[in-house]
Image (spheres, grey):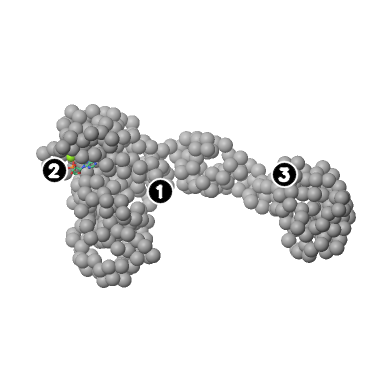
Amino acid sequence: MISVDAALTQVLALARPLPQETVPLADAAGRVLSEPVIARRDQPPFAASSMDGYAIKAAEAERHAQFKVIGEAAAGRRFPAPVGPGQAVRIFTGAPMPEGADFVVIQEDVTRNGDLITITDEPGAKPNIRPAGVDFTTGTTIDAPRRLSAQDVALLASMNVPLVPVTRKPDVALISTGDELVLPGQDPGPDQIIASNTFGLKAMLEAMGAQPRVLPIARDTAASLHMAFDLAQGADLVLTIGGASVGDHDLVGRVATELGMERSFYKVAMRPGKPLMAGRLGDMAMIGLPGNPVSAMVCGHVFVAPVIHKMLGLGEARPALHSARLAEPLGPNGPRMHYMRAVVENAEVTAFDSQDSSLLTVLSRANALLIRAPHDPAQATGTIVHYMPI
Ligand code: AMP
Ligand code: MG
């Protein structure tokens, strides 16, 4: 049995950053930018009005001053001639400033009579102009690697980048194992249960930016597992669920070894999740997750997330730890790292009373995994502890 930290180091060693591909801008959200993108234009490309009003010379912007309106500038349509002394151009938000004008008096500060306007309120010192390039200029860079947010997509669009270089999504084959499992929506027999963490992990993988493939459930026979591994071919990561303990029907380790898996480790000093295995299977990384629903999901957060992160080119980051005060005392921890299902609220964390690794109801109510180091002594209310948000 190895420590969580040692297991994480070995799991990360199985992962390689994936090559890049190009995707349309509209599909870029959530993807990882694989190389810096450089703006090839200024934004705005011209000095633009930031208000609806009248473009005039700043030197003439005084209360009671009068101007003759000589034309109009709207967004997408500039006024083609210069503005002289005593002249004004009706202007709207986003319109290019006409030559000769360097101030926009807002329409609320003006009264208009035919072609004549009078400034009736103090126009203030703010020119109401967005200078050319105030947002970004040619050469401005979005650095990589970076997971692209909705905001980043807006910025890329503004930079006129229709195709975005991103890291290819990790192809993850998900193999559930067990004679007792049926798919959600099917009619389970009296001794059967629904494959649940298969879909939890699929959702988790999608949120991480991977491309999961849910393979048909493998039965607890060597032949069925062989077939499942066959279907997994070409994946970057094979995730098996269940069948990894030492029971008579736990065949994942045996079959993977027959197929040439170089095992990195088996069993980690953690709770839940002890019967975790990992290794290399040809070009694929393999992680054998425990079958217990909570164990599988917790191992997903602790081990699979960092692997996907690295495959996406985001480096070897360990899960970020947050701190909170204990709302209730905790008893002493045993010899394994404990990931307790907990709720964090108003900077206080409370672990659930029941920590059984089969309880998805508890996991679903949790928003954090409270982390206890091996042999951590009892802790009083108010102690600062670490947790992982989930
Ligand atoms: P195993 O590691 O195969 O012995 O599985 C441990 C426990 O997890 C057993 O109670 C299984 O029925 C259950 N289990 C295994 N795989 C899944 C799955 N995909 N969804 C829900 N429960 C599972
Ligand atoms: Mg099983």
Label 1 crowd (10 A; few <14 / some 14-19 / many >=20): some
Closest to the observer: 242 or 192?
Answer: 192
Q: What residue type is labelled 1?
A: Gly
Residue type, mark 2 in image: Val
Residue beneath disc 1: 315
The answer to whether the beta carbon of the residue marked 3 is less than 8 Å from any atom of ligand 1 is: no
Q: Which of pointers 3 and 2 lies earlier in the amino acid sequence?
A: 3
* Residue 42 as seen in the image, left or right of residue 22: right
Horizontal side of 127 relative to 207 (left or right) equals: right
Q: Is residue 263 left or right of residue 153?
A: left
In the image, residue 253 sits, relative to residue 141, either above or below, namely above
Alpha-carbon span between mark 1 and mark 2: 34 Å
Residue 76, picture quadrant: top right
Judged from the image, the secondary structure of the residue bearing numbered disc 1 is: loop
Please report the residue visible at 79 percent of the width from the left and 53 percent of the height from the top: 54
Residue at the image position 75 percent from the left and 47 percent from the top? 96
- Residue of label 2: 246
User: Which amino acid does the dot numbered 3 rest on?
Assistant: Ala
Q: In which quarter of the image is ligand 1?
A: top left
* Front: mark 3 or 2: 3
Is residue 156 positioned above or below 104 on the image? above
Residue 26's x, y, as percent? 52, 38
Mark 3 lies on residue: 75
Residue 381 in sight here: yes
Residue 305 in the image: x percent, y percent?
A: 35, 47
Question: CA gap, disc 3 to disc 1?
Answer: 44 Å
Q: Label 2: how many residues lie within 10 Å, few (<14), some (14-19) or many (20+)?
A: few
Residue drawn at the location 83% of the way across and 64% of the way down? 63
